[in-house]
Every structure is written in C-alpha cells, then in structure tokens.
Image: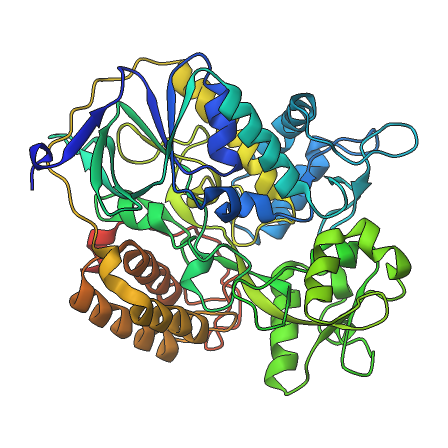
Amino acid sequence: MTLGHLDTKRLPAGAVLVVGAGLAGLYLALKLAPRQVYVLTSRRSSVGAASAWAQGGIAAALSAEDSAESHARDTIAAGDGLVDPEIARILATEGPARVHDLDALGVPFDRNDKGELYLSLEAAHSMPRVARVKGDTAGREIINIMVERTRAAEHVTGLIGWRAESLLQDGNGAIAGALARNDDGSLLGIEADITVMATGGVGGLFAVTTNPRTARGDALGMAAVVGAKMRDMEFVQFHPTAIDIGRDPAPLATEALRGEGAVLTDVNGVRFMPNYHEQGELAPRDDVARAIFAEIEAGRQPYLDCRTAIGSHFDEEFPTVFKSCMSAGIDPRTALIPVAPAVHYHMGGLATDSFGQTSLDSLLAIGECSATGVHGANRLASNSLLEAVVFGGRAADYIKGRDWAERRAGTIRIQPWLSMGKDVSQTLRNAMTAKCGVRRDAKKLNELIDLIDSLINKVGRANPLVASRVIAACALAREESRGGHFREDFPEMAENAVSSYLTYDRLD
C-alpha cells in the first residue's frame, strides 16, 4: 500500500518525531530546543510510562566520597562481562551533571539536614549513590516535572492519542517517520526527517511484570521488520521482589528496602539468601531473583521482612509500597510482604552507538528500547533513569550538531497487532513467562519459538510477536548462563563474553 492511500502529516524540515513519552523521550525533547519536536504518545502515557513507576531513584556519583570511576566499575561488574567500558565511563562521568540538571528543572530530590542530596544504597553499588524523591516516588515525580516542562515548551508539540505501529521508509531504506493509529482506529502516516524511538521495554510480553502492560517491545518489532540491528535481546532482568498479590502489573517492592536492611525470609521469618549468595539480600538482582524462584519452586513462599529495618516509618519513607501493601490488607510495618520475581527491565534492544544512532539512517533509539552496551547482561540498580537522561541528552546534541537529509516516505506496512486479540496476547504472555523466564532450557525455548511462529502465521507479524520471537531466538542461541540469562542446560558461564547481534531476516 502506498502512502498516498493514507492520511498524512509532513513535519517541518529538520523536525524530530519522538515516539514515546517516558523520561528519555521527554528529556530529549526539552534538550532539542529550539528545534521543533513532535512527541507521539497515546493518552495512556501519563500512567503508562515505565519511567514514572521507578521507585528506587537515579544513581550517580554525587558525593565527595564517590567517583565516576567507582560508579563505572560497579556498572561493569553488574553487567557480567558484557558492559562496554567506554559507554559505562560516559554514563558515570556525565551522570552527575544530568542529575543536577533535573534538580534545576524542579525535581524535588530528598535532602539531608545540610541541604545535600540524600543518597541511598542499592544492590551491587559499592557506596550510597542513589538520589531519591519522597522516598520511593522518584520516577513519578521526575515524569511529572518533565511533562509540565514539555507542555510549556514552545518548540514541543504533542501528538496525543496516537500509537505508533510501524516505521515508514524512503526508497533507500532510511527511516522517514512512522505510521500511527488513533484511538478511534484511523491511521496517519507521519513523515519526518529524524525519528527517535523511546518506547520503553518488554515487560508486557510476560505474564508477571512490574511494567505497564502496554510495554510490549513495540520499537523492537517495528524496527526489526525493516532490518534494524538488535543487540543482547536475550537479557531480561527479573526484579526479585514484586509484591505477590495477584495484580497485573505486579506492584513493586523497591530494592531500596533491602538497601535499608529489609531481609528475605520464609513464612517463619527465617532468612534464606545466605544459603544462595555471600552478599545475601544485596546480591545482584539476577542472583536474588533465582533464589526467590527456587524457594517458590520448592513450595516455600518467600517474603520480604521490613518490620525491623523500616518499621513504623514505612508510610513516610516508602509511601508507594506502603499503599500497595495496605490495598491488599497487608500492613508492612507489622506483617511480612509476599514477593515473587517479575520482568522489570530489558537490557537488550536496538543496537545504537553512544549518541543513539541505530543501524538505519535517520532512526535513533534511546532509553530502555535501545542497547548501547551500558547494561551488559544485567543492569545495575537505578542506572535506568540515569541512562535515559545521559543518552537522551547526547542524542539531542548529536541531532543538533549535524545536517539531516530530507526523508520522503515510500511504501509502508500496516501493523497487524490489533488482530492479536486478548486470547493471543495472553497465550503469548503465559508462554514467555513459562518458557523464557528466570530459568530457561533448549526444550522450553524451542517449544516457545514454535508457538510464536504459529501465532505469527495466524495473525501476522505483530510487533509483540516479532519482539518475542527475537528474544526467544537469542535466548536459545546463548548456550551459557550470564547475568539475567540463566540456562538450566548450560549453567556455567562461557569463557569469552560476547554480545549478540541479530537482524530479523536471519530468523527466516
């Protein structure tokens, strides 16, 4: 189908189309001033951006005792051999200035009696360096400020109520904007010289997640079918302590609770983490998630015990967690919190350089849908919000610092994701959790791939199916256990740490 058969909107020359309204997309939009920016987002974005759900805070070397070198070392160690050292250096070196920028924009970071930023300790950090906002509301408060600032910015236009579903290309394969669908089902081809994907992660592909259900790897699916290179797609981080109360998505019990001294126990209050890892509750997330999963498989419900560490101050220090618990009839000041692992973050994504440039001309990616190499096989706690502003800022500088060719769209693909329906979506989510979850093996992954192929044959190459297919294929190909990827049939780590790169045509 040619573009002429659709309603179209041509953005002004040099304008930027940003797909997604989380922290990365909004920060980029602000930093692109005075260049014109159009932010494409559904009406659900105010409550559906995963950035807004981040509880722990934003990590950076902000104290006199800390250093960028230390932060970079911790980031590299957490990534289990796959972090690009230069990218980690960029994140850690540029991070403090970006946090101070957020502070200047009006983010109400918590402060101590001296007026300094209050910094908390989280797992796998060598010292306290996580800046928090009102205890556990960092993500929400930061997003609120960013939405307020972008709404007031004259150079930013919101395309509200539209959901991107495929990418437009010119005759040479370069990206020339996106096809979007309105809430009423109407289609609009938006031609743009520069397109930036900032759509978030993949949690909605799994049955148990702390992410918005709409986070279904849309950017990955859209870009994959037009030939974009993807990196380390198999690495999915499972947050160890989702609150296990049967909610979808599952509420999160932030890692900062364990940083403050909360412990993981059985129903009788007996700790079990020392049996699994020498760092106990502050072990890397993948180790903690597998330990909790092992307890569940053994028929022992795991709990988070905050009674001593947090106690009567719970509602003041961690209001989000407190509210979630109380809504389920659990008072965390006096009772144990049932927990389970849940998909929380995707380390893989569209392969980019340090400025967000993908393998396709005129297409950039930032935030969780990108893969710069900064997270490797396992993201360090609270590096995600930092990544959004550091690499969102770098992408803005890159866009402003070069000339961009005019892009005119040629042919497009109508995206069949609407034909998935609830039954297909739930089938996919259940299968991804059961066969590509905390513990994987070849048999389960091959069964999963066969299922996804059958669903693609049934409904077409819908974005969630394409993204899931690539994740499963990469998980099958990596015959080792590393970071967030654990293979029961290959439990050891390979001698050489090598990132995986893939294009969708290699799966056919």
45 on left or right of 358: right
Q: Report if residue 375 is visible in the image.
A: no
Residue 457 % position (x, y): 16, 67
Give residue 276's quadrant in the image. Answer: bottom right
Q: Which colour style is shown?
A: rainbow
Depicted 124 relative to depicted 366: above or below: below
Residue at (58% x, 50% y) in the render: 379
114 on left or right of 326: right
406 on left or right of 498: left
Query: Depth check: 408 or 351 in front?
Result: 408
Q: Report if residue 404 is visible in the image.
A: yes
Residue at (84% x, 29% y) in the render: 116
Quarter of the picture containing the N terminus is top left
Quarter of the picture containing the C terminus is bottom left
Depicted 283 relative to depicted 29: above or below: below
Residue at (65% x, 73% y) in the render: 292
Depicted 252 relative to depicted 168: above or below: below
Residue 144 % position (x, y): 60, 35
Give residue 453's quadrant in the image. Answer: bottom left
Depicted 338 relative to depicted 119: above or below: below
Residue 247 % position (x, y): 56, 68
Residue 319 % position (x, y): 75, 52
Q: How many badges with numbers are in the image? A: 0
Query: Depth check: 156 or 275 in front?
Result: 156
Give residue 366's quadrant in the image. Answer: top left
Query: Depth check: 12 or 496 in front?
Result: 12
